[in-house]
Amino acid sequence: MTTNNEQDRNRAIQQEILSGRKFSLAEAIGREGGDFLKGESPVPKLLQATTEIKTFIAQNLQDSSGALQIILQTWVTNDEAGVSQYLNTPLDALRQLLKTILDHPELLYELVRQVDFKWGQLYDERPYFQSPGQTPHPDDEYTHESVKAMLLTLLNTLETSINS
């Protein structure tokens, strides 16, 4: 903590340094803005939180083909409102997203549809789209049940990570 004497000395030194200079708006802005990011990261909190979530997904989701990881990370990136509510605890935002998907079958079906589409793009093959209530194709890697199981496993890993 600085005392009044130290502050007065600092002002006097600053005035002496600046006495021979001509005033410029750029310099004034630079002086005032110098403390703006003091102690803060120049990376926005939302980007930091999103990156932490995406890294967790990449490191903990068991997804050999990678399509689910890509789409889930895209959903996180697009869920700015959800992530913004948990800037200080980003993994809670992921927990909330996973619970929402698992609690709403129509969201799960849409996620699986997007994952199937991405799989087709990645492997240049025709994807297998499973309709709700329909038996999945035997070669379909991403069925409603398999994606649900992968998300539940990720959620369990997340819960363990948060609680430790």
Image (cartoon, helix red, strand yellow):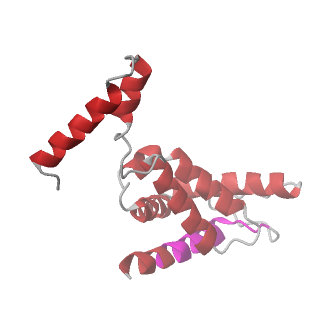
Q: Answer whether residue 80 is visible to the viewer in this image.
A: yes
Q: Answer whether residue 131 is visible to the viewer in this image.
A: no
Residue 45 image point, x, y percent: 42, 50
In depth, the one of 122 and 26 nearer the eye is 26
Residue 150 image point, x, y percent: 60, 73
Residue 56 image point, x, y percent: 55, 68
Residue 64 image point, x, y percent: 74, 72
In depth, the one of 41 and 116 nearer the eye is 41
Q: Is residue 20 magenta?
A: no
Main SS of residues in magenta:
helix
Residue 36 vertical position relative to residue 87 in the rendered view, above or below:
above
The outermost residue toward the right is 124
Region of the chain picked out in magenta, as a range = 140-156
Q: Is residue 144 magenta?
A: yes
Instruction: Name the residue at 63% across, 67% down.
Output: 58
In depth, the one of 4 and 149 nearer the eye is 4
**Number of callouts:** 0
Instruction: Name the residue at 44% across, 78% down.
Output: 161
Q: In this view, does 118 lie to the left or right of 87?
A: right
Residue 26, by quadrant, is: top left
Quadrant in which the C terminus is drawn: bottom left
The outermost residue toward the left is 4
Instruction: Name the residue at 27% across, 30% down.
Output: 15
In depth, the one of 30 and 149 nearer the eye is 30
Quadrant in which the N terminus is drawn: bottom left
Instruction: Name the residue at 82% across, 69% down.
Output: 139
